[in-house]
Structures are given as C-alpha cells and as structure tokens.
C-alpha cells in the first residue's frame, strides 16, 4: 500500500514541477539517513593493531620477548620486541594502504545527482538524495537511487551491474498501475541505483534509497556468509605450540640434569636458557606475517590489492576460476564486426579498408545515432564512420537534426529526421531490431526470410545485429509515427563485445597450471559460447542455462558441474549455487566479477576477486582481492604470485626446522654426555642475527621456481609440511649437527683447548647454516645453480655473517665474550669443507631426481 502511495505521488503535477523543498529534503535526510550502500565498517589504525595483536602467533612472540626480559637477556628481549613493532608497522601500513586505495575507488555507490528542488535544478552528492526527490536522468549519469520514470525520451539504461545482461534496456513512462518489480527486461518504468544511462533522458521520482534499493538488498545478504580460517594458519599455530612445549620441557630437563648430576645450577640455568633460545620458534610468526604482508605489497605493484591475507595463501591451491563474461573476459565495449548489404558481407578489419558497396549502410547507421553518443554501439558506429567515410560524401557533419522517433514497446526501432543546409527534402535514417526494420520496410515474405537468414547467420557468430533503413520525405509536417515513412532496407550491422587481447594466453596459462576456467554470465548461450571459443575455452560446446539450473537439485548440479564450463542466463542466486556446488566437489574456487550480481558468489568463493575500475562497492567489499586495472591477466599474475609466496613460506619454514636441529642439538648433547658446553646464549643470539633476516628477507625475495605455472595446484588439505618435507628438513639439520658435533668432539679429543674446539665447531655451524640456505633456495635446482640466481638480500646477509664471524674470531674483546680462540687459515678451510659436506648428500639426491625428471621429459618429448 505504501509503495502504491509513493507511485501515485510521483504523478502529482506539483511534485513534477517543483520537487521537494530544501527543508523537506534536509528533514528526510536526517530522519531516513544517507543514500549509501551497506559497507563494511571502516577499520581505523587502532582496529588493525588490535586485530594483529590478537593473533596467537604474535602473542607468542611477545611472550618470548617478555621471557627473555625476565631472565635478564635484554638484547634478545629488545630484538623480539623490535620484531613485534616492525611486523605490526608493516601490517598496519599495508592494511591502511589497501583501505585508502579502496576508498578512492568508491565512486559508484554515491554518484553525483541532478535533482529538482524548490522548482530549480541542483547538482548534489548522491548520498544526499532522499526518498521523494525528483531526479533528472541524462546520458552518462549513474542513477543515484531506485526511482519511477515520470517522463522520458529514448531512455536506455545499462543494468548489467544488477542483471549481468550487457545490452541496455529500454525504459518507459509509468502507466499509473504497474507495481515496482525486479530489474531486467525492456519497457519497465523503474530505474535502479548504480545503473548507467547510456542513451536518452528522463525525469524520475525516487522510491528507495540506500539499503532499501535493489543494490542494498543484495548487499544485506552478504553478511550471512562467514570467512574460513586457512589450513596454513591452523598448521603454523599448531607447529608453534608444539615447538614451544618441546622447548619448555627440554629447558627444564637440562636444568635438572645440570643441577642434580653436576650440582651446577647456575650452569644448568645458562644451558637451559641457551636450549630454550635454540628451540623457541620466534621465526614462525615472523615468517608467516611478513611474507604475507610483503606479498600483498608486491601484489599491489601489479595492480592487485589484497583485502584478505588468507587469499594469498589460498591462491596456490586454486583449482577453478569462475569469471563473468561482460567486462571480465570482454571489454564491455561494443565494436562493429560485420556489415551485410545487398547479399554481400564485409568483416570489419582494423587494418583493412571498406568497399564502397557498404558506405551507404554505414552512412545511415551513423545518421541514426546521436551526434555525441554515449551508447557503446553508437560510439562504435561513429568511430567507424570517421575512419572510413571522412573523405567521402557519406559523412554529414553540417546536417541538422529535425526530429527523433524513439524506441517504443510496439516498435523496437528509432529514427532520426535530418535536413541538409541546401536540401529540399527530409532524410530519415532508422536502426533497430531486424524484425522492427523489416516491419518498417513492409517486406514481402521471401525478402523477410532472406534477411532473417542473414540475421541468424550473424547471430550464430555471437554478434548483436541491428537493421538499418532509410527514407525520403517531402517537406511539410512530419508524421507522428515512423510507420508513415516509406522506408527502404539498407542492410545489417553486427556488433561484437570483443574479448580482451590477452585473454587467450591467460586462459592457456590457467590450463597449464591445472586451473579450470568456468564462465558464469547472464547473457545468452550463443553469445557465451562465441566468447568462450574466442577466449580459448577447452569446452565451449556444453552450456547450462538458468532455466535448466533452476530445475536441478544441488546433488544433480554437483554431478554435471564437473564437465560444464559455461553457464548462461543465470541470476545472482544461481551464481552462488554454482560456486557452492564447486566447493562441495572439493574445488578451491576463485570467483571474479565486477557487478553487484557477483557479490554473494564473490564472498562465498574461497577467493573473491573484484574488478576495481568498473566494479561496484558491494563487489569490492565482498572480494578478497581487487584488480585495479580490470585486467583478467592480473588474476593469473595473482595466482602465480600466490604460488611463489607459498613456496617461499615453505622454504623459510623448512630452513627454520633444518637450522634449529643442529643449534638445539649442539646445546643439549654436551649436557647429556658431560662435555664442555659448546653454545651459550651469546652464540644463539649471534646465530639469530643470521636466521632472522634470512627468514624475513632472503627467502621472501627469492625468485619463483621454474615452471611454477606448469604444475598442478596443491591440495586444499595439503599441509605446509608433509612427512617427506619434514623428514628432508630434519635430516638436513641432523647432517649439520653430526658434522658440527663431530668437529667439536675431534677437536676436544685431539687435546685442543676448549675455546679452540668451540670456535671450530661454531665456525662449522655458521658455514653449514649458509650452505643450508643455498640448498633450501630451490627444490628444482642445485645449490651451485642457485649461486647464479641473484638474491641481493642473501649476498648482504652472507657478507655480514662472515664479517661478524671474522670479528668474533679475531677481535680479542669479542673472543673473550664468545669464549673463542683464534683459528688458522687451514682450520678455517677445514670448517668450510665440513660445512659444505653437510649438504653434499642432499645435493646428490636432488641432482639424481632432476636428472631422472629430465630423462622422463626427453623420453616423452616434453
């Protein structure tokens, strides 16, 4: 009833003439709120810091620092505290950078609006539009709110943001009876917030604003979908907990052994502290957070903004990429592809000319368009006309437009009446649906069938076909109807929404990476199939449309979805069903889109990617990633970078396990066997100065593996460390431990002083550490090969580590602090050889595996 009252009020003359008063508008704005879409609450710096500090891994990092502070290890406490602030700083900077960038993109939900208030036109911010406002609609404007059309002329609106349909729809004046309905279809008197006016003009009265618009209703449903915690977060948290418990137990064990066996509680406390420092995994939270934060920063350099760090982790396991057709695979910009006239066809080629035979067709198609068009099809016609008719008599810049006949429900064609400066007659140009042009030309059955056969042939190529006709009218009073002109058929124009230039190569790269591409569109099946073939889809033959989808149960959909790559004529709820069905089949789903109709599916998908340039606020708020350049290729770049980031996280974590084994072993074995202590807290702190930058800088900046997009996605449930990876890392660490303790034991057995034995073992451990770094840099290339792959951070860390080692070995003050004795060049060489020996066996295994793989490639011709 209320809706009916609003519609009736829209037709009152006083409302149309004067609109609301400024006072009435101000009161309604205060009472009903601003005209804004529902959006996520803006996160302040304090919100971001609070979220970061609630992470269990950060709490552990802080706890480690406080532990060191309590026991008096101020340098270690300060170092860990510095890590906390650095990581928080990086995260806050990145999050705020993303938030600011997204705020800059928020231009669709609240466009500028032209309203009539107090009888005068006024340009206001879209957020100030209120219910009951009279708004003026013109080409190029975005509709600021849901409204009913009071009057209009040739009004066409692009509602693809809501419906997914690329072709604009006609609007008619309200008949005083029709109730407000959902968007979609021609000849409706309702306009909808955030849709784009591509042609004509009109006046409308606002019915709904903000959350009560069709855009807002979709936005409200998004709050019901909750994000999922990633496997990487769970696994890393468990790993940290395990190491922390093990470290605490071993620390207590060492203290007890020293106290009860040796009666040296102070030495036991120092040994236990050293062991705790060796085992406590403060690097794990640092690696995970810094890698993801810096990864997001690096992705932003490639026009991909990260709204959720989880998305970076999930990208490497993505198996299905669901894309919308309009604006994602295509440019959402019509271009003239084919002309047909007089039984001949001409395919438009950017590099080729145009035969004279088709000049008349293009001439009248241009005359039937606006002088300064906004509609993409009319823009394409004008551009083609300027290119091919500029030096001919077929372009008429000096002609005067006398009258326009708009599209109507009964006749899907428009006509422009022109008069030349010296002409005595009117020239009429008409274009529209082929059936309407056939009707205007009063064709016979034979000619009609011939034209429609041509239309079907062009439509079969995925083209949007318009007919063109012309007429001459003697000067006098122009008729009220287009049917009163004596039209002659000129020909047909076929428009194509071209696919993006790099789509084919990007889709091929997806297939090579084991990522299936699925098109979900509101467009027609024929058009979808044509675009799929142009884009290089593997399966462009099988299509499921929205009506078929509606009849399927969820179980039936799960069965057919594995062999169907094209879904056409679907509505928003069905897009969400498709994504959920894929997820139910165990797929890791990436969903890209730019319209409001994509938003629920974007949020439900494992990774939602919104188009930043043309996408709506609702889509961007729902997505985990935002593409600033609206380029499909950037999705593939994001997937590549996601795999690289995950690879490097795994390498860093593997290195942490490998290097902690010899450090922890060197701290506990002397205790168990009654040997002199090899490592004290100062030695552990020294090693941490190498380990920490390696974990947070060296591996983060490591180049991607060869053929990174040539391997299948990892399983969603695949752990960061499977049994094989854990065993490999542990064995590397055990090898370094054996070499290090062997050097220490041999030195002691040969009668060398304790300081010299400690210096030999420690130098060997530092060299082994550097060798493990080189070996861990790649699983596909040997350490010697990786020496030729530049990594400036590793170079700096290596130089710094060796320089610091030289200082502690040969500067007397530092020798005393580290309890070392100086080493001879021969002893240094022996340490280098021993350190390199620790990874020799693993490098041989790696080389053997690589040779076997290359042999298989040669045998298969790969």
Image: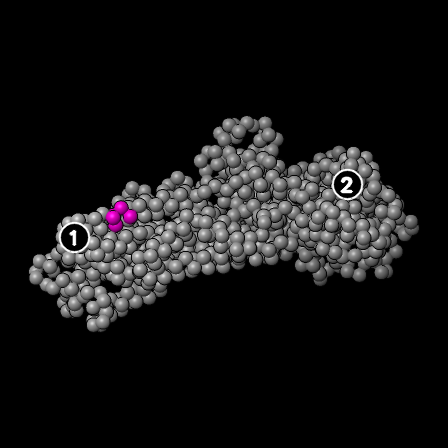
Label 1 packing within 10 angstroms: few (<14), some (14-19), many (20+): few
**In this rendering, would 400 be left or right of 622?**
right
Label 2 and label 1: CA atoms lie apart by 93 Å
| Residue 730 or residue 401, whichever sits in front | 730
**In this rendering, would 741 be left or right of 132?**
left
Tell whether position 570 is magenta: no
* Residue 78: image location, x then y, percent: 36, 61
Residue 629, picture quadrant: bottom right
Residue 451 visible (yes or no): no
Do tag 2 and tag 1 residues touch (Cβ < 8 Å)? Answer: no
Question: Which disc is residue 115 wearing?
Answer: none
Tell whether position 251 is magenta: yes
The residue that appears at 29% across and 48% down in the rendered structure is 248
**In this rendering, would 804 be left or right of 460?**
left
The residue that appears at 71% across and 48% down in the rendered structure is 33
Q: Is residue 8 above or below residue 339?
A: above
Question: Which disc is residue 263 wearing?
Answer: 1
Secondary structure of the residue carrying numbered label 2: loop
Task: Classify the position of the N terminus by image quarter.
Answer: top right
Task: State the residue lying farthest toward the right.
Answer: 476
Residue 812, picture quadrant: bottom left
* Residue 740: image location, x then y, percent: 18, 56
| Residue 65 or residue 479, whichever sits in front | 65
Residue 99, picture quadrant: bottom right
Q: What's the magenta region? A: 248-252
Residue 95 visible (yes or no): yes
Q: Which residue is mark 2?
A: 189
The residue that appears at 35% across and 50% down in the rendered structure is 650
């Amino acid at each position: 009833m209320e809706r009916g009252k609003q519609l009736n009020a829209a037709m009152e003359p006083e409302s149309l003439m004067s609109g609301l008063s400024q006072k009435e508008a101000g009161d309604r704005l205060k009472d009903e709120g601003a005209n804004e879409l529902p959006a996520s609450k803006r996160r302040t710096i304090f919100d971001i810091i609070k979220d970061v500090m609630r992470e269990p891994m950060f709490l552990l990092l802080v706890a480690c620092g406080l532990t060191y502070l309590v026991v008096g290890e101020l340098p270690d406490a300060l170092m860990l505290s510095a890590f906390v602030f650095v990581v928080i700083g990086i995260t806050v900077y990145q999050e705020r950078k993303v938030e600011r960038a997204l705020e800059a993109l928020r231009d669709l939900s609240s466009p500028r609006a032209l309203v009539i208030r107090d009888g005068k036109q006024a340009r206001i911010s879209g957020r100030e539009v209120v219910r009951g406002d009279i708004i003026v609609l013109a080409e190029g404007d975005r509709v600021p709110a849901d409204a009913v059309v009071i009057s209009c002329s040739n009004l066409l609106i692009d509602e693809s943001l809501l419906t997914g349909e690329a072709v604009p729809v006609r609007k008619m004046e309200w008949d005083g009876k029709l109730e407000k309905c959902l968007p979609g279809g021609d000849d409706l008197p309702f306009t909808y917030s955030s849709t784009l006016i591509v042609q004509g003009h009109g006046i409308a009265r606002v019915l709904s604003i903000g959350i009560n618009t069709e855009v807002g209703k979709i936005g409200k449903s998004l709050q019901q979908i909750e994000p999922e915690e990633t496997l990487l977060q769970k696994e890393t948290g468990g790993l940290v907990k395990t190491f922390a418990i093990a470290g605490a137990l071993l620390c207590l064990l060492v203290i007890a052994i020293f106290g009860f066996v040796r009666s040296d509680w102070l030495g036991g406390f120092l040994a236990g502290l050293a062991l705790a420092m060796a085992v406590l995994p403060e690097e794990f939270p640092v690696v995970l957070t810094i890698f993801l934060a810096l990864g997001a920063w690096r992705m932003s350099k490639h026009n991909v903004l990260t709204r959720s760090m989880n998305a970076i982790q999930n990208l490497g396991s993505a198996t299905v990429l669901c894309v919308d057709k309009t604006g994602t695979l295509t440019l959402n910009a019509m271009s003239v592809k084919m002309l047909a006239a007089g039984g001949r066809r001409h395919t438009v080629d950017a590099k080729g000319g145009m035969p004279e035979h088709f000049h008349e067709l293009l001439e009248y198609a241009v005359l039937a368009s606006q002088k300064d068009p906004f509609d993409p099809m009319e823009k394409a016609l004008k551009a083609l006309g300027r290119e091919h008719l500029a030096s001919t008599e077929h372009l008429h810049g000096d002609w005067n437009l006398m009258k326009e006949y708009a599209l109507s429900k009964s006749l899907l064609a428009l006509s422009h009446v022109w008069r030349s400066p010296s002409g005595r007659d009117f020239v009429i140009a008409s274009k529209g649906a082929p059936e309407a042009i056939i009707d205007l030309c009063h064709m016979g059955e034979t000619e009609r069938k011939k034209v429609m056969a041509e239309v079907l042939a062009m439509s079969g190529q995925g083209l949007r076909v318009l007919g063109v006709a012309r007429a001459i009218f003697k000067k006098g009073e122009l008729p009220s109807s287009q049917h009163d002109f004596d039209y002659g058929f000129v020909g047909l124009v076929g428009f194509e929404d071209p696919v993006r230039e790099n789509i084919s190569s990007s889709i091929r790269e997806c297939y090579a990476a084991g990522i299936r591409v699925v098109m979900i569109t509101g467009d027609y099946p024929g058009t979808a199939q044509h675009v799929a073939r142009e884009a290089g889809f593997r399966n462009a033959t099988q299509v499921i449309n929205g009506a078929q989808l509606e009849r399927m149960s969820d179980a039936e959909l799960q069965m057919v979805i594995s062999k169907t790559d094209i879904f056409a004529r679907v509505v928003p709820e069905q897009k969400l069903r498709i994504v959920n069905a894929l997820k139910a089949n165990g797929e890791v789903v990436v969903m890209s889109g730019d319209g409001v109709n994509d938003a629920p599916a974007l949020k439900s998908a494992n990774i939602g990617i919104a188009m930043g340039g043309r996408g709506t606020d609702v889509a961007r708020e729902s997505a985990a990633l935002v593409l600033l350049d609206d380029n499909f290729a950037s999705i593939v770049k994001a997937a590549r970078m996601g795999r690289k980031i995950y690879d490097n996280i795994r390498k860093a974590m593997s290195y942490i396990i490998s290097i902690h084994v010899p450090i922890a072993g060197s701290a506990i074995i002397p205790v168990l066997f009654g040997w002199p202590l090899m490592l004290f807290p100062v030695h552990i702190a020294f090693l941490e100065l190498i380990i920490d930058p390696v974990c947070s800088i060296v591996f983060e900046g490591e180049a991607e593996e060869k053929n990174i997009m040539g391997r299948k996605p990892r399983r969603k449930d695949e752990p960061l460390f499977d049994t094989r990876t854990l065993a490999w890392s542990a064995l590397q660490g055990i090898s370094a431990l054996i070499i290090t303790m062997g050097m220490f034991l041999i030195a002691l057995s040969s009668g060398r002083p304790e300081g010299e034995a400690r210096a030999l073992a420690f130098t060997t451990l530092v060299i082994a550490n550097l060798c493990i770094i080189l070996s861990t840099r790649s699983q596909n290339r040997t350490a010697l090969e990786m020496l030729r792959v530049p990594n400036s951070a590793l170079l700096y860390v290596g130089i710094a580590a060796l320089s610091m080692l030289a200082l502690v070995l040969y500067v007397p003050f530092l020798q005393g602090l580290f309890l070392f004795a100086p080493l001879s060049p021969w002893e240094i060489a022996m340490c280098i050889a021993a350190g390199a020996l620790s990874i020799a066996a693993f490098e041989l295994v790696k080389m053997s595996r690589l040779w076997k793989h290359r042999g298989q490639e040669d045998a298969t011709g790969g």
